[in-house]
């Protein structure tokens, strides 16, 4: 049974999720909450500088292209 609140067909939802995964590839903004460093990576990872796992991860496609 399909969720009646969805605006997508199952195929459209799958296509949308695949497009988001592609947009995230090599484009994840990372911010270390311990040492305050920032970098762009292709996956969510621990801080390369201090080793902390207290890292904020935000997909870059969420930022406007002003």
Image (cartoon, grey):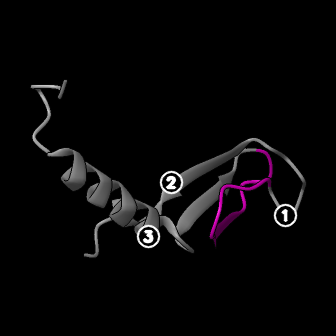
User: Which residue is found at the position 11% from the left and 26% from the top?
Assistant: 5
**Which residue is under mark 3?**
22
Question: Vertically, is 9 above or below 49?
Answer: above
Specify whether 60 is left or right of 25.
left
- Read off the magenta span: 34-46
Question: Vertically, is 66 above or below 59?
Answer: below
Specify whether 58 is left or right of 7.
right
The spot of residue 21 in percent (x, y) is 45, 62
Specify whether 20 is left or right of 35.
left
Q: Main secondary structure of the magenta part?
A: loop
Rounded to the nearest angstrom, the CA distance separating label 2 from label 3 is 14 Å
Q: Given this view, does label 1 or label 3 mark the residue nearer the observer?
A: 3
Rounded to the nearest angstrom, the CA distance separating label 1 from label 2 is 17 Å
- Looking at marks 2 and 3 on the same chain, the residue that comes earlier in the sequence is marked by 3
The spot of residue 42 in percent (x, y) is 62, 70
Rounded to the nearest angstrom, the CA distance separating label 1 from label 3 is 24 Å
Q: Residues within 10 Å of mark 2 (few under 14, many from 20)?
A: some
Query: Mark 1 touching mark 3, by CB under 8 A?
Result: no
User: Which residue is found at the position 57% from the left and 74% from the top?
Assistant: 26
Q: Which mark is residue 48?
A: 1
State the SS at label 3: helix
Q: Which mark is residue 58?
A: 2
- Looking at marks 1 and 3 on the same chain, the residue that comes earlier in the sequence is marked by 3
Q: Quadrant of residue 8?
A: top left
Does 2 lie within the magenta span? Answer: no
Query: Mark 1 touching mark 2, by CB under 8 A?
Result: no
Q: What residue occupies the far right of the structure in this picture?
A: 50
User: Which residue is found at the position 84% from the left and 64% from the top?
Assistant: 48
Q: How many marks?
A: 3
Q: Given this view, does label 2 or label 3 mark the residue nearer the observer?
A: 3
């Amino acid at each position: 049974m399909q969720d009646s609140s969805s605006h997508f067909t199952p195929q459209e939802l799958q296509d949308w999720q695949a497009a988001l995964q592609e947009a995230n590839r090599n484009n994840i903004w990372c911010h270390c909450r311990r040492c305050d460093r920032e970098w762009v990576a292709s996956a969510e990872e621990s801080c390369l500088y201090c080793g902390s796992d207290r890292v904020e991860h935000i997909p870059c496609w969420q930022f406007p292209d002003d």
